Amino acid sequence: MSFLEYQVKTVPGGLRKVFYLNWPLVVLVAAVSSVGFLVLYSIAGGNLSVWAEPQMKRFGVGMVLMFAIAFVPIWFWRNMAGLAYGITILLLLAVEFFGVVGMGAQRWLDIGPLRLQPSELMKVTMVMMLAAYYDWLDLKKTSRPLWVLIPVLIILIPTFLVVIQPNLGTSLMLLMGGAAVMFAAGVSIWYFAAVAALVGGLVVAVFTTRGTPWQFLHDYQYRRIDTFLDPSADPLGAGYNIMQAKIALGSGGWGGKGFMQGTQSRLNFLPEKHTDFIFTTLGEEFGFVGAFSLLILYGLILFFCFTSALQNKDRFSQLLIIGLAANFFLYLAVNLSMVMGMAPVVGVPLPFLSYGGSVMLVLLIAFGLIQSAHVHRPR
Amino acid sequence: MRRTARDTEESARRISRRGLLMGGAMAAMFAVLGARMRFLSVEQADEFRLLAEENRINMRLIPPERGLILDRNGKLIAGNEQNYRVTITREDAGDVDSVLARLTRIIPITAEEMDRVTRDIGRNSPFVPIIVADRLPWEDFSKVAVNAPTLPGVTPEVGLSRHYPLIEDFSHVVGYVGPVSEKDLEERPNPDPVLRIPEFQIGKIGVERWMEETLRGAAGNKRIEVNHVGRVMRELERTDGTPGQDIQLTLDADIQNFVQARLGEESAACVVMDVNTGELIACASAPGFDPNLFVRGITQRDYSALMEDDHRPLANKTVQGAYPPGSTFKMVTALAALEAGVITPETTHSCPGYIEFGDRRFHCWKRGGHGRVDLARSLAESCDVYYYEIAQKVGIDKIAEMGRRLGLGMRHDLPMSAITEGIMPDKAWKLERWGQEWRVGDTINASIGQGYVLASPLQLTVMTARLATGRAIVPRLVRAIGGKPVDMPEAPSLDLDPAGLRSIREGMFEVMNTQRGTAFSSRIADETMVLAGKTGTSQVRNISAAERARGVVSNDQLPWNRRDHALYVGYAPFDNPRYAVTVVVEHGGGGSAVAAPIARDAILRALHGDIPPLTAYPASQRGRIETDLDALRERLRNTGPSGSSRA
């Protein structure tokens, strides 16, 4: 039980909650999503019904969901954390056994008309679970090995289930998202340093043993890394996506080629142009100005999340907001790095822009939770 | 659990501290992303803009329309025919199998064809049209067009493909086109990019091959916008190429057709040449083949049949066949002797039926011998001994020199395939070729066109034309290119002694027009078109002494491929020569019986410009000739009025 329960009286009730929502955040989310609609409309060659319209419908449904979640008191969600986490784990297992194989990986679960990606939902429920755990945990035990092991397991179980789908991008995001909550909760910096040292050592080991009989990876895996490091070396093979994406972004120049004028995306040179690589179309058509403006919008969203978290005195709310914001940041950072040729191509969508139902819904659920924490913060 | 106020404060402070750290890290990442963005889209913009442009625009070649090949009167020999075909595009068809099944009910498609189509569909991108049926008859094509609404993805198309309406008549001269092979590309140092267009066809043999560049023209191109998988999005710009130039040949399609029909089933060659210009009027090799088979891609069975035929339909015997010229060579020996001054036309030799030289006996074709013969009679009766005698006096080198002056033993440059040089042997040649000294026996053999001497029907025609005119006539096949007549310079004189030439021609006249002449029965009765010529019968085997003692077996009793070759060379009209003719019938038997009648019909056809009237033939033969000509008329192609059109 947190201290919050004693202060319920100070929390706004009923429809008055509308006035206590974090409105700048709502406006920013809507703005970024609108940019997405515009780009999707352009990629479809000026056709609304191909991608933009379904995306708008999902956004509409998601907004309703967001407000509904925001109106439910945050302590309800904290009490639901364990259940939500458990259900998502079960969904992940269900995908493993009954899932639809899409793009060579099992990611979707068909529930009636809804096609759900439990791995996306996991990003939210795992943060909820970890926040609830640290809210429950005695502050002094935070850095004790046993109490560090429990959240590590909370993170590793879903990560493992996602890796075997296989979906490397999402599992890495789960790892980092979970680590962000642990970091925010105050787990000793030395744990992170140790993990970083371990990973660094592993990378060095992998590369120094290359070509020796005891090399860690298969040759083809090394070649993939090579391609990542120098995509132009294999422009028609594995480096193709990155090369074409860079061409699209680069050819946009300062001001872009203009709305609906992008040749790269319209001529189908770009793979996944409406999903993971949507940023390239934006960059091609609106140039550096357009792309940088989007970056500023994202930065503002994160800024408002963090100020909301810092204003909050409730430990669960704080950790939840920071965890979800970190997740949001990871989406965009990984996606942009990948599209701009700074990271390997892993299937991570650009939040609120990429076409896709699960991600849009999950993101709006996350922002619903952030709003709920904001509205129901102790005063 | 309940927390104390101190714990809460501590928790909030710790989270704030860590939160600020994370915020800082995020801000740093943002800075990196922003810098990267700037680097890509501002600093490297120009480079990427260029790459994007390259990505987008592609050059495609538009194959030029191939030039036509016409005969001297403008009749079409090789044209471009509308080719009706049906293609299927997978992405438009949806359910390919059911569409194909419906298509099969409309037009016949064999099971093998179907397998090929399914395979091609699987191998290509969904938007690539696959040819389901090619060269459809118009009825089938229109049936598909009518049913198009029920056949999604099926497109009836019209393309151009090479067509040879005169079928086998020009199969050897003009040849055919076929798909570009790896070898074709290797042969060319800088192959025209148009050759790499799939389904593009180039000349494989004959005029189609040797005048390929003229016929092909230059490809146009179009700039098109494509996507990364090569699908054409739209055409940006188009430059039309230049169509290939039309080529007009010197050949007359009607005469060619007549000659081809006259040769019939024989394995034979016939060349008719204008003696004044060197223009080839007819150049026929029998049997022929249908060049259209090769354009369509000949089946293994058809090809084997052509290859295994002992009459060698694929060979162009007129230029490629090298035959011992036999007695048709005697003019060369005689003229060499006359020019060398070792004989005069009045010189006589006695023919006892053979001469003995060393331990060998060289026979005359006539066992009993001819008695005393002069030059004219030696030609008229084709006495061999006369030539054995004069050849020994003049020597092989002078004979060979005369042969080359008359066009033997050299390659005449015409746009045809596998043109042989023949062999005009002399001492140096034998030493080089066989490493042996030339012997007098070799000269004796060569004097009557046997032994090492080999000549093609084309060379023999050139020889005859040069004898008839006394000028260095050069054979020509091309009359005009792209409507512009080919320059034909006057042939220079051969500087032969007119008296000697006159006596040779006199002898050739006597061959045809005196009772004792070997080809008297093949004379032309029309006094304005008198034919002069020489028969030849060349052995393809040695007759041993034992065989000769038993009595030489007549040709009829020998297997076909061991019989003698029948040859004839001649020109007409005698007093004012217009055409020279050569006929070689492989294993045909005697030159006078087999080759001469064909030559007479061919040259009469050329002189009359139509099927010769019976009055041109000797009265005694008209009954038989009439039935022969009637039978021949049946085999002629009704080519209709002359004139050309681009298909």
Image (cartoon, rainbow, N blue to C red):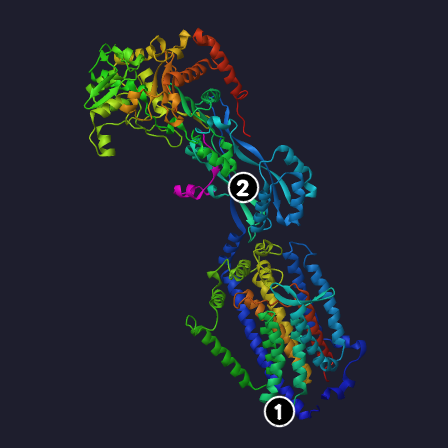
> Residue at 45% across / 73% down in the picture?
A215
Q: Position of residue B526 (x, y in %)?
A: 42, 8
**Along the line of sight, which residue is nearer the eye, A192 or B260?**
B260
Q: Which residues are magenta?
A: B174-193
- Label 1: which residue? A140
Q: Amino acid at mark 2?
A: Arg
Instruction: Determine if residue B400 is in view.
Output: yes
- Is B403 located above or below residue A4 in the figure? above
Q: Amino acid at mark 1?
A: Lys
Chain letter of the residue beneath label 2 in the structure image: B
- Badge 1 element: helix
**Along the line of sight, which residue is nearer the eye, A295 or A102?**
A102
Q: Position of residue A27 (x, y in %)?
A: 70, 69
Q: Does the segment drawn in magenta span residue B176?
A: yes
- As drawn, which residue projects farthest toward the right? A14
Chain letter of the residue beneath label 1 in the structure image: A
- Badge 2 element: strand
- Is B228 located above or below residue B303 in the figure? below
- Label 2: which residue? B238
**Along the line of sight, which residue is nearer the eye, B84 or B512?**
B512
For the residues labelled 2 and 1, the Cα–Cα distance comes to 78 Å
Instruction: Determine if residue B218 is in view.
Output: no
Side (left or right) of B162 relative to A329? left
Q: Quadrant of the N terminus of chain A?
A: bottom right
Number of marks present in the image shown = 2
Picture quadrant where residue B511 is located: top left
Picture quadrant where residue A8 is located: bottom right
